[in-house]
Image: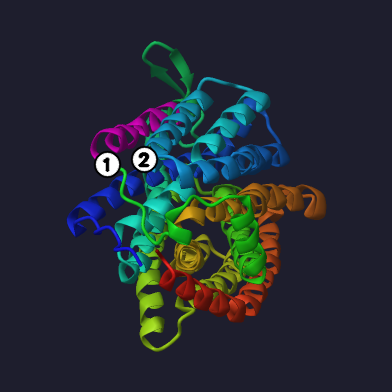
C-alpha cells in the first residue's frame, strides 16, 4: 500500500471550506430568492401558482440534473477548483440576468442557467472536502458546508426583506432607479444585486484556493472507467437507492415549503414580505445553522457509541423531526405559532442534506465520488428541488382549488413525502452498513 499524500494544514483546509461555503451561500440564495419575490413577480407580470412553481423548481432542477452527470465525471478527472469557479460565475450571471427579463419564458431560461452553474457545486465540494479533511473531521466539515444553506436562507429572507422594504415598499412592487438601466421593478433589482455579489466567491476561488491532492484512491490510483462505475453501482444498489430517494423525499418537502412560505404568510396571515422575511430570516436561519453544525456532532457521537452507520442514522433522525414539525406547523392558527413551528423544524432541516454527503464520501472511492455524488444530485434535484415547489403549487391549484388553502397543500405534501423518506432510509440502514464494510476492505487494498 502506497503512502497517502499528507493532508493540508488544518487552518488552510478550513479556509478552503470557508470559500466553498461562501460560494454555496450565494448559490442557495440564488435558488430560493424566487420564492421570496413570488408575490411581487405575480403582481407585476401576472403568473399563476403553477407557473411560479415551474420557475421555482423545474426550470432550475431540470438543467441542474441534466448537467450533473457529465460534471460529476469531469470532477473525478479534472480540476475541481476551476470547475467550481466556472460554475459559480455562471449561476451568478444567470441570477443577475433574471433581473433583465419580464416574462415566464425569460425567467425560465435564466433559472435554467442557474441550474447548469450549480450542477458543479455538490460533486466538486464533496470531492474537495474529502481530500482536505481527515475522516474523523469530515462529518463536521460537511455539516459546516451545509450550514451555508441555512445561512443563505437567513440572509436571503432577512436581507431580502430589508432590501424589498427599502427599495420596493411593503409589497416589493415599487420601482428602483438602477444605474445604466433606469427605473425597474424592485424584484428585478434584487435579482441583479444578488447575482453580481455572487461573483466575489468565484474570484476568491480562482485566486486563493489550490487544487488538493487526491486520496483514498482504489485500484492502484487509476481513473475509474465505466466497468468500475457499473460494478460499484450494482454492488451498492440498495444502499444508494434508499439513500438517494429517502433524502430526496425529505428535500422535496423542504424545497416546497421554503419556496411557498412567503406566499402562505401573505395570503393567510396578511403579513408583508419584509415582515415575514425579517422574522423568519432571524429565527429560521439561526435554527438551520444550529442544525447543520449539530448534525456532524450527532454523527460522531453515534460512531463513538459503536454505530458505524452514524451518518445515515443522523439522516433518519432529521427526517423524523422534520416531518413531525412541518406536517403540523402550517395548520397552526396564528402566524407566530406557524413561525415557531417552522423554526423548530429548522433544528432538523440540515441533518439529512449534510450527513447524506458525508455518507456518500464514506462508501465511495475517490475516483468515483464526483460521479456518485452527481447521481445523488440528479435524484434530489428532480425529485426534491424540481418537484417540491411545483407539486405544492399544483396541489393548491388542482386539488384544493383555492390560493387561500396553500397551508393544506404544504402540510399534505410534507407528511406524505416525509413518511416515505423515513421508510426508505430505515430500510437502507443494513445495506449501508454492508457498503461501509466493503469500503473499509477497499481502503485496505489501496496500492
Mark linked to residue 209: 1
Name the quarter where the N terminus is drawn: bottom left
User: Is 326 placed above or below 375 here?
Assistant: below
Residue visible at 75% across and 48% down in the picture? 394
- State the residue in front, 52 or 69: 69
The part of the chain drawn in magenta is: 191-210
Residue visible at 59% across and 39% down in the picture? 67
In this orientation, does residue 265 appear?
no
Majority secondary structure of magenta residues: helix
**Distance from the alpha carbon under mark 1 to that under mark 2:** 7 Å
Q: Residue 343: x, y in percent?
A: 45, 65
User: Is 303 placed above or below 275 here?
Assistant: below
User: Is 396 placed above or below 78 here?
Assistant: below
Name the quarter where the C terminus is drawn: bottom left
Label 1 environment density (alpha carbons within 10 Å; few <14, some 14–19, many ≥20): some
User: Is there CB contact under 8 Å for labels 1 and 2?
Assistant: yes
Residue on which the image places disc 2: 81
In this orientation, does residue 327 appear?
yes
Mark linked to residue 135: none
**Magenta segment: does it hold 370?**
no
Name the side, left or right, on which 92 lies relative to 138. Answer: right
Residue visible at 34% across and 59% down in the picture? 144
Q: Residue 297: x, y in percent?
A: 35, 74
Q: Residue 82: x, y in percent?
A: 38, 35
Amino acid at each position: 500500500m502506497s503512502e497517502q499524500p499528507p493532508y493540508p494544514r488544518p487552518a488552510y483546509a478550513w479556509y478552503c471550506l470557508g470559500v466553498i461555503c461562501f460560494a454555496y451561500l450565494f448559490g442557495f440564495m440564488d435558488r430560493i430568492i424566487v420564492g421570496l419575490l413570488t408575490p411581487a413577480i405575480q403582481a407585476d407580470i401576472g403568473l399563476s401558482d403553477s407557473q411560479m412553481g415551474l420557475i421555482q423548481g423545474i426550470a432550475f432542477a431540470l438543467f441542474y440534473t441534466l448537467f450533473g452527470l457529465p460534471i460529476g465525471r469531469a470532477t473525478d478527472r479534472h480540476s475541481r477548483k476551476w470547475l467550481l469557479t466556472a460554475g459559480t460565475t455562471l449561476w451568478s450571471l444567470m441570477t443577475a440576468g433574471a433581473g433583465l427579463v419580464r416574462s415566464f419564458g425569460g425567467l425560465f431560461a435564466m433559472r435554467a442557467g442557474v441550474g447548469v452553474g450549480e450542477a458543479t457545486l455538490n460533486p466538486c465540494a464533496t470531492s474537495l472536502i474529502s481530500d482536505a479533511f481527515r475522516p474523523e473531521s469530515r462529518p463536521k466539515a460537511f455539516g459546516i458546508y451545509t450550514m451555508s444553506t441555512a445561512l443563505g436562507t437567513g440572509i436571503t429572507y432577512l436581507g431580502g426583506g430589508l432590501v424589498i422594504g427599502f427599495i420596493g415598499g411593503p409589497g416589493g412592487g415599487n420601482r428602483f432607479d438602477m444605474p445604466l438601466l433606469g427605473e425597474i421593478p424592485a424584484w428585478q433589482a434584487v435579482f441583479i444585486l444578488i447575482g453580481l455579489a455572487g461573483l466575489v466567491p468565484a474570484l476568491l476561488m480562482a485566486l486563493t484556493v489550490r487544487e488538493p491532492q487526491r486520496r483514498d484512491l482504489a485500484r492502484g490510483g487509476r481513473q475509474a472507467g465505466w466497468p468500475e462505475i457499473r460494478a460499484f453501482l450494482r454492488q451498492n444498489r440498495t444502499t444508494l437507492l434508499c439513500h438517494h430517494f429517502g433524502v430526496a423525499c425529505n428535500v422535496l418537502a423542504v424545497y416546497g415549503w421554503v419556496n411557498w412560505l412567503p406566499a402562505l404568510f401573505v395570503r393567510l396571515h396578511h403579513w408583508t414580505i419584509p415582515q415575514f422575511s425579517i422574522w423568519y430570516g432571524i429565527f429560521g436561519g439561526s435554527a438551520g445553522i444550529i442544525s447543520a453544525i449539530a448534525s456532524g456532532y450527532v454523527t460522531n457521537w453515534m460512531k463513538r457509541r459503536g454505530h458505524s452507520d452514524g451518518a445515515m442514522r443522523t439522516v433518519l433522525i432529521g427526517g423524523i423531526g422534520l416531518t413531525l414539525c412541518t406536517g403540523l406547523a402550517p395548520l397552526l392558527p396564528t402566524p407566530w405559532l406557524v413561525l415557531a413551528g417552522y423554526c423548530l423544524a429548522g433544528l432538523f432541516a440540515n441533518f439529512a442534506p449534510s450527513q447524506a454527503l458525508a455518507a456518500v464520501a464514506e462508501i465511495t472511492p475517490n475516483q468515483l465520488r464526483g460521479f456518485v455524488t452527481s447521481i445523488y444530485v440528479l435524484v434530489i434535484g428532480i425529485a426534491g428541488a424540481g418537484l417540491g415547489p411545483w407539486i405544492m403549487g399544483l396541489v393548491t391549484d388542482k386539488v384544493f382549488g383555492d390560493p387561500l388553502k396553500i397551508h393544506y397543500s404544504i402540510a399534505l405534501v410534507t407528511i406524505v413525502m416525509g413518511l416515505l423518506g423515513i421508510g426508505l432510509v430505515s430500510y437502507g440502514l443494513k445495506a449501508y452498513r454492508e457498503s461501509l464494510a466493503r469500503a473499509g476492505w477497499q481502503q485496505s487494498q489501496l496500492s
